[in-house]
Amino acid sequence: MGIEHTGKTDTHVEGADESTAKLQKPSMRPDNPGSPDQPSRLQSLARAREPAQPQNVLQTTDEGPAKAVSKDEPMEQGLLARGPEDDDLSAWMAAAEQLLGKPEPEVPDGKERTDETGEKIEVVADRLDVPDDLGSVVEYGRPQAKDKDGERSELPLFDGMPKREDALQGALGDCGVIATIGAVAGTAPDKIQSSVRDNGDGTVTVALHEAEFKDREIATPTGRIIDVTITKDVPVFIENLDQAAFARCTDAGVTWPGYVEKALGAVDETWPSDRGQNPLLGNPVERGYARLDKGSRAWMQAEILTQLTGRSARVSRLDTDPGAAADNEAVLSGLVESGRPVVVATVPEFMQRGDFRKYHLRCAHAYELIGVEDGKALLRNPYGRKHPDPVPVAEFTNHFNSYYAALESETGGR
């Protein structure tokens, strides 16, 4: 972790308006921190035991290079539906998992594993890995606001209480991450505000709750805090250094979403070295932004919900029976009415069982569920625009993955 990759070119960011610069193929930068001859400045002070790997070997995949994105279409999430959502593949992977077993998490820095709660884990991170195909169009810097006279100024950490509209996906393929951040900001903004602090020395600390999966469906807080201290530098576009490239802080007018995104990329410094490696494919482990770019599934989204709130989150499944619309509507309505963040995702185009275009849905893309009205699901696109039309709950599982992530109730019920 900490290597700033350089590789493919030609990528664009989803913008709120036409002011976002159109990226051209840039030349290689002479100064490339993190290249083989210039080591990264990333440091890790991860302490105490590392959390056990959640029981979901499908959380990350070897998807290969991410495709470039257009100005109006940010990077889509990875293989969202190729997990336990696909029953055949799920059974195959479960059998393989049983055959191969799961490696025991390694203990960092020679520290003994401990079950004590209440202690903190500390991580210090500067420059995280970026995806190969974005490494030559972004560099690290600080996004800035620009007024009508062209005067630049530092963006504030917050502008009032955090809100879901602050979380805007950029050129990184982490729609599930941004949708989850927005879902927490929209339902529990105090959790965000209290977890992010400016240290006044060019760094920010994001306090995340360590999470573990005690069973396959529930992410549970361990009681320990992961203090992720990061520099304020985040990826910006080489051709528009004021513009944040990933979480679109510049468009949002606040920096907290970019810092939370960066902290979630840096938290893997507390993981075992082989977490994220598919034992069947032998794919290399990716870290930082490069890992987030691979996309996420309901299990990772549940883990992030717990990390941001300190409460358990569950991966649940809707009934796919055609006659289950009333039951599914009751489930989704109950989740929204209870004020819990909920993240859902569409399946890839080849798995769609209806015309997804009539609702202006994107395939293999994560959304926040924000309401259920008149038998229809209301959804927020993490792009911050191009929100889909309300989707009838009766048709929901024709287009959406039946698995979804939601925070558990305060009493621990579903």
Image (cartoon, rainbow, N blue to C red):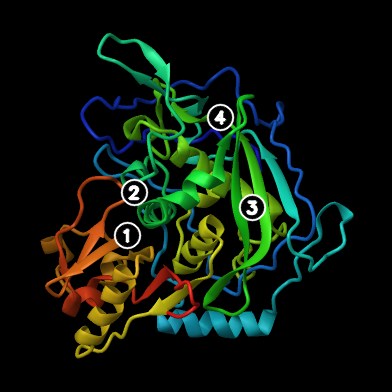
Where does label 3 land, which residue? 268
- Dot 1: few (<14), some (14–19), or many (≥20) neighbours within 10 Å? many
Residue 77 position in % (x across, y down):
39, 55
Q: Which mark is residue 368?
A: 1
Residue at the spot 50% in from the left edge and 33% down from the top edge:
135
Q: Nearer the viewer, residue 164 or 118?
A: 118
Query: How dense is the environment of label 4, judged by Cα within 10 Å: few (below 14), some, or many (20 and up)?
Result: many
| Relative image position of residue 321 (x, y in whole percent) | 25, 89
Mark 1 and mark 4 lie on one chain; the one further toward the N terminus is 4
Quarter of the image with the C terminus is bottom left
Distance between mark 1 and mark 4 Cα atoms: 27 Å
Relative vertical location of residue 31 with respect to residue 212 in this rendering, above or below: above
> Cα distance, mark 1 to mark 2?
9 Å
Any part of residue 293 in sight: no
Report the residue marked by disc 4: 232
What kind of element bears circle 1? strand
| Secondary element at tag 2 | helix
| Apparent side of residue 400 relative to residue 95 in the rendered image (left or right) | left
Give, as a three-letter code, the residue at label 2.
Arg
Nearer mark to the viewer, of 1 and 3: 1
In the displayed structure, does residue 366 sit left or right of residue 138?
Answer: left
Quarter where residue 53 is shown: bottom right
Numbered marks: total: 4
Tell me the distance, in whole angstroms, between the alpha carbons under discs 4 and 3: 19 Å
User: Please, is residue 176 above or below residue 231 in the view?
Assistant: below
Callout 1 touching callout 3 (CB < 8 Å): no
> If you read the primary sequence from the N terminus, does the residue marked by circle 1 or circle 2 appear first?
2
